[in-house]
Amino acid sequence: MSRNSELFERACKTIPGGVNSPVRAFRSVGGAPRFIERANGAYVWDADGTRYIDYVGSWGPAILGHAHPEVVRAVQEAAVGGLSFGAPTEGEIEIAEALVARIPSIEKVRLVSSGTEATMSAIRLARGATGRSKIIKFEGCYHGHADSLLVKAGSGMLTFGNPTSAGVPAEFIQHTLVLDFNDNEAVEAAFRQHGAEIACVIVEPIAGNMNLIKPQPGFLEGLRSLCTQHGALLIFDEVMTGFRAGPQGVQGLTGITPDLTTLAKVIGGGMPVGAFGGRADVMEHIAPLGAVYQAGTLSGNPVAVAAGLVTLRLLAEPGFYEHLSEQTRKLSEGLAAAAKKAGVAASTDYVGGMFGLYFAESVPTTFAEVSRCNVDHFKQFFHEMLNRGVYLAPSAFEAGFVSAAHDDAIIDATLVAAEEAFAALK
Ligand SMILES: *Cc1c(COP(=O)(O)O)cnc(C)c1O
């Protein structure tokens, strides 16, 4: 028996499902999850000592490659100086200044410890600042696991949604409207009907939690103008896309300015850091200045902030994103070519250091389209790649992540494996 399987059996005795976050359990692809012993650069090693080229990158944070020596050194040095104080530090000012300087819409920012906390807090702030209750989210966009966001669409376009998790009372989500991503008419209709009650629209401006789905021309512009017109706040959830899709997130790529932005993943460089920020007049509604309560014992943790600061500094080096995006392009185009060669219906897309692989003839633009991808082909492909030393996200509905450590030889090795894997699909 492999050590991965042994560890999984052991884990299942004390940890529900053997994992601390559900997608890690390999439920949607089958088999025992790989227990990771260590990681370096573009590689992870499992408990059997098998090496994999990693396209999960801790679900996004590992943009410099795993265990980047400068990040590790910063963490070690910070740790020696104390792990947590529950009092302000200069490092927090430095990371706030870096975020304000780099993300166009952020004038003031508060640190938290996860993406979930960032979005949950941003929504509370939007409600507190506008004095309104309703929020709009889009089907297939994930904003963490706060109660009011675990919602799927109801039966009709403008009916309120249904909880996607047990334990979320229907009353808790009665203010959440769930609409289709890339459907401007639905948003217009929602504002026509509920305009004066809508506190905010929250959106992944490039969706990365239903595979990779880009906004169609006019979608984000439409959200911006409807929010402005109706006095609602526009929240870009850039927890995944921030410093990943480009140096200023999707707002930098599109020139569309949200009122609030949520960040996490990359900004912690692998340590738990999240943030929400935006217009100063809105941010000033938070305690201790304003009436919207928000707090955190470990918020702005000095060790986590040290990792984030070095990461942000390295990301600012000239040519970083050009290189990252070029490596991602080679992978994305190579995967599409390999599928074509094998006669498999698959397409790909990418932006910055994120990519999508879809078992569909063409790149999907809606949740309905992405839901129709050939999941059976994905499962087979996932295991064929794993057996050839390539670790993809264990779900057909996740984006993939490339790091600066994915050099040409690593991309080429991935494409050799992919040609064989596509050819092996039944
Ligand atoms: C990962 C993610 C979250 C949740 O972040 P956690 O740190 O896992 O709580 C929220 N929004 C988006 C867009 C994400 O990708």
Image (cartoon, helix red, strand yellow):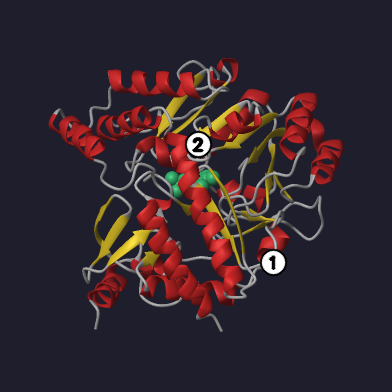
Residue at (60, 55) in percent of width and height: 169
Mark 1 or 2, which is nearer the eye? 1
Q: Nearer the viewer, residue 345 or 18?
A: 345
From this viewpoint, is residue 136 visible? yes
> Which circle marks residue 378 in the picture?
none
Q: Residue furthest left?
A: 80
Residue at (43, 47) in percent of width and height: 60
Residue 72: x %, y % from top left: 22, 39
How far separated are the C-alphas under marks 1 and 2? 29 Å
Q: Nearer the viewer, residue 420 or 135?
A: 420
Instruction: Give the mark nearer the N terminus: 1 vs 2.
Output: 2
The quarter holding residue 113 reads: top left
**Residue type at numbered disc 1:** Glu
Q: Is residue 118 above or below residue 358?
A: above
**Residue type at numbered disc 2:** Gly
Whether the residue carrying mark 1 lies under 8 Å from ligand 1 is answered with no
> Which circle marks residue 361 in the picture?
1
Tell me the residue that label 2 is attached to.
242
Q: Are marks 1 and 2 in contact (CB under 8 Å)?
A: no
Quarter the C terminus occupies = bottom right
Q: Secondary structure at mark 2?
A: loop
Q: Secondary structure at mark 1?
A: loop
Residue 240: x %, y % from top left: 50, 43
Give left or right: position of 28 versus 272. right
From this viewpoint, is residue 273 visible? no
Residue at (65, 32) in percent of width and height: 254
Residue at (29, 73) in percent of width and height: 8
**Disc 2 crowd, CA 10 A, few/some/many (<14, 14-19, 20+):** many
Quarter the N terminus occupies = bottom left
Q: Nearer the viewer, residue 336 or 165?
A: 336
Residue 178: x %, y % from top left: 71, 49
The quarter holding residue 168 reads: bottom right
